[in-house]
Amino acid sequence: MNTFINGLLRLRRGPWEMVATILIALGVVMLMQPFAMVLFTYSFVVTLIGTVMFIIVSHFPE
Amino acid sequence: MTDPIAQRVAAATPPRLAHRIRGLSDRTIAWLFVAPTIFLLLAVNIFPLIWTIRLSMTNFRTNRPNNEVEFIWFENYQKILTDEDTWTSLQATAHFLIWTILLQVLIGFTLAYLINKKFRGNDLWTTLIVLPMMLSPAVVGNFWTFLYQPQIGLFNYFVQFLTGTDPASFSMIGEVALAPWAIVIVDTWMWTPFVMLICLAGLRSIPSSIYEAAECDRASKWRQFWTITIPMALPFLMLAVLFRGIENFKMFDLVVQLTGGGPGSTTLLTSIDLKREAFEKWRTGYASAYAVILFVTVFGLASIYVKALNKVKDR
């Protein structure tokens, strides 16, 4: 956990890609789930943030 | 010594052009070669994408080109993401996507595993299994519509043979509960061979020496399967899932031909919904916003997947 937080603070690719991946996956699940309309409404914003973040952080150093 | 082909090319180049090229660096010449491709890519992919994003923030309608186009920012996105019908359509897509990928991977890998064993008529079976993939989706959709007919369809008689149900008592493409499964069955029938081929390539790439070493270590067949076959075929399996996932997210032709999105909107996948918005209701701005949402979703998923694939390959 400490390594992960350190990686985030030092702007390392691995942990930031992990955060972006979780956001994208969460957004897609929110988009397609059949339970709550409010999750569907905010799904696109979450996916978009995750995708843009993924593009940016994939240029961070290892 | 210079390559004779290069010498011939140099001799055939007109002196004026040769003089001009001589002044250019290797980097510039490389850019000159790549430029037409980049130009095409920009014109065919990037420009329409930017134009779609721009349109998604307007109230433009293609059937009313003379109307004044208003810039409405994110209103279309707001409408889509609060629309119950769009939500239902995405749920139908999720059902289709999850089940087709699951079935295709399971059946495709099993078939590949069996075909990979040496037996008589191996090539003939491979050709026969691959046949559905070579057919046009329109043709497949059309003849499966006949197969699903309650009175004359062979599928209903096959179900009767297995379960004893009266063939006229149910309609695969006419009933709300069965139609989503009808499209899953057809897509699985059509595209499992594709997954099988990719898995077969993966299985054939595993060196036999690894299995021989495992035999020497007295590893059981079951252990060999889980510790050699699956890990080494995994990148290929993931590639198959990526290809099928993206394709099925965009699925249109097969389902239109089979059910047309019905009954009601039970098989109204997102691409069919999008087409209706764009070319039946002519809400171009709204449809563009819808397309952008789908694009971002597929792009995000593909990014994760490519990352995972690279990790598996680097292991």
Image (cartoon, rainbow, N blue to C red):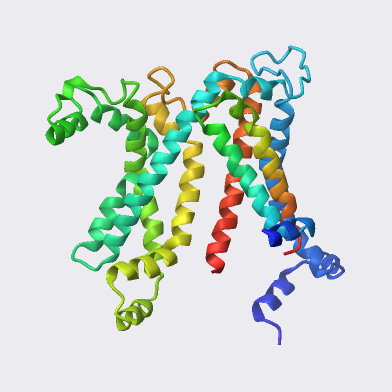
The number of numbered discs placed on residues in the rendered structure image is: 0
- Quarter occupied by residue B229: bottom left
Give x and y (percent) for residue B242. 50, 50
Give x and y (percent) for residue B55. 71, 26
**Quick one: which residue is furthest to the front in this view?**
A2
Query: Relative to residue B63, is residue B309 depicted above or below?
Result: below
Identified at 78% across, 17% down, the residue is B70
Which quarter of the image is occupied by the C terminus of chain B?
Answer: bottom right
Give x and y (percent) for residue B252. 46, 32
**Quick one: which residue is furthest to the bottom in this view?**
B1
Residue nearest the observer in this picture, B220 or B31:
B220
Residue nearest the observer in this picture, B31 or B276:
B276
**Quick one: which residue is furthest to the right in this view?**
B23
Query: Relative to residue B215, is residue B252 depicted above or below?
Result: above
Give x and y (percent) for residue B121. 20, 62
| Residue B200 seen in this snapshot | yes
Identified at 33% across, 37% down, the residue is B186
- Quarter occupied by residue A28: top right
| Residue B134 seen in this snapshot | no
Which quarter of the image is occupied by the N terminus of chain B?
Answer: bottom right
Identified at 49% across, 49% down, the residue is B243
Identified at 47% across, 35% down, the residue is B94
Residue nearest the observer in this picture, B95 or B42:
B95
In the displayed structure image, the side of residue B82 where residue B139 appears, left or right:
left
In the displayed structure image, the side of residue B134 where residue B5 appears, left or right:
right
